[in-house]
Image (cartoon, grey):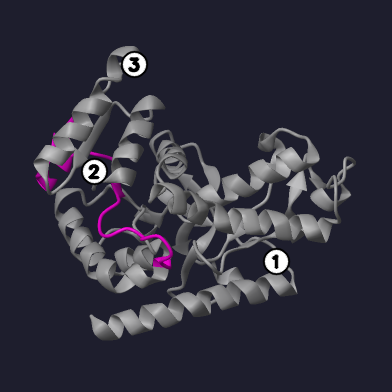
Amino acid sequence: MLGAGHLGSAIANALVLREVARRVVLYDRRLARAQGEAWDIGDAVPHLQEQEVEETDDLGDLSGVGVVVVAVGPTVETGQNRLELFDVNASLIADTMAALDVVVPDAVVLIVSNPVDLLTRVAVEHTRRPPGLVLGSGTVNDTARLRYALARRIGVDHANVHAYIIGEHGQSAFAVWSSALAGGIHVEDFPTGPGTGSWEEVKRELELFTHSRGAEIHRRKGYTNFGTATAIASIVRSVVRDEKRILPVSCPAAPGYGLPPGAVLSLPCVVGAAGAEQCLTLPLNGTESALLASSHTALQEVYERGMQHS
């Protein structure tokens, strides 16, 4: 775990509480900070299965780990767009990947720092490891928010709802309603209906909720960490246990989406021991295809400007 800030420490804590791995190493440039967080998290271990929680300010101590979660660099300030962080964090991620290629060349690297889709692209371009071994946290938490809210709206368990938020993890993300299902039934055909309001009104309401939830939390407490950390722990578990879960992570887009080579967006992937093992081509209608292309364009513009400044 690289970074012991609000999010990094919450991720380490989630990994321990969910007993994802037998060894969690928490790295931070400030050793005292890594120690404080690791020792506090480690005090939970007597109540759980045996695990090792280690602290370090030396990247060499990551040797032997199978997954590296990267949560380094400045975080989003209240009212700030994630894309504004790209110029600052891109060079940091490039340098981090160069260091990780030396210390843990075969590990799966999970990028969490924002803007996550763009930084995952930078990571893929600045590593010697196969592209599948690098992925980003993408819209996993956004998708979980949508599924949970939708499930409550139609009165079913959220485990039976399948719908995705894809594109940029940010302002241009969107819900893929054309393939949203509950128990194998398209949500708009589900017997209970949407409750009050039309389905179009409900879809707008749920997308607004999904888009604004993080910002509303941020406005009140200054950052988000617990929900995101739990989502990231789920991604790590799918890698560590080779679960082959389909998760909307940041990854190079499959050719079926018709995007230019090198495009990295949050899209459904099979996630297992080899990282993002296969990016799936989700069927999209015309409107959704246009939204995905627009999301890529927004990211590409920021990427090109950032590369000119680097």
Residue that protrudes farthest toward the top in the picture: 46
Task: Give the residue drawn at x 56%, y 69%.
Answer: 172
Which of the labelled discs sits on residue 239, or is there none? none
x, y percentage for residue 156? 76, 34
Q: Quadrant of residue 155?
A: top right
Question: Callout 2: few (<14), some (14-19), or many (20+) C-alpha neighbours within 10 Å?
Answer: many
Task: Give the residue drawn at x 43%, y 68%.
Answer: 81
Is residue 95 rendered to the left or right of residue 271? left
**Label 3 amino acid?**
Gln
Q: Quadrant of the C terminus?
A: bottom left
The foreground one among 271 and 217 is: 217
Relative to 92, residue 161 above or below: above
Q: Quadrant of the N terminus?
A: top left
Sequence order check, earlier mark of 2 and 1: 2
| Disc 2 from disc 1: Cα separation | 39 Å
Sequence order check, earlier mark of 3 and 2: 2
Q: Tell me the element at label 3.
A: loop
Q: Which residues are magenta?
A: 54-82
Task: Give the residue drawn at x 72%, y 38%.
Answer: 152
Which of the labelled discs sits on residue 4, or is there none? 2
Say whether residue 73 is magenta. yes
The foreground one among 224 and 63 is: 224
**Label 2 amino acid?**
Ala
Residue placed under numbered mark 1 in the picture: 284
Relative to 55, residue 68 above or below: below
x, y percentage for residue 232? 42, 43
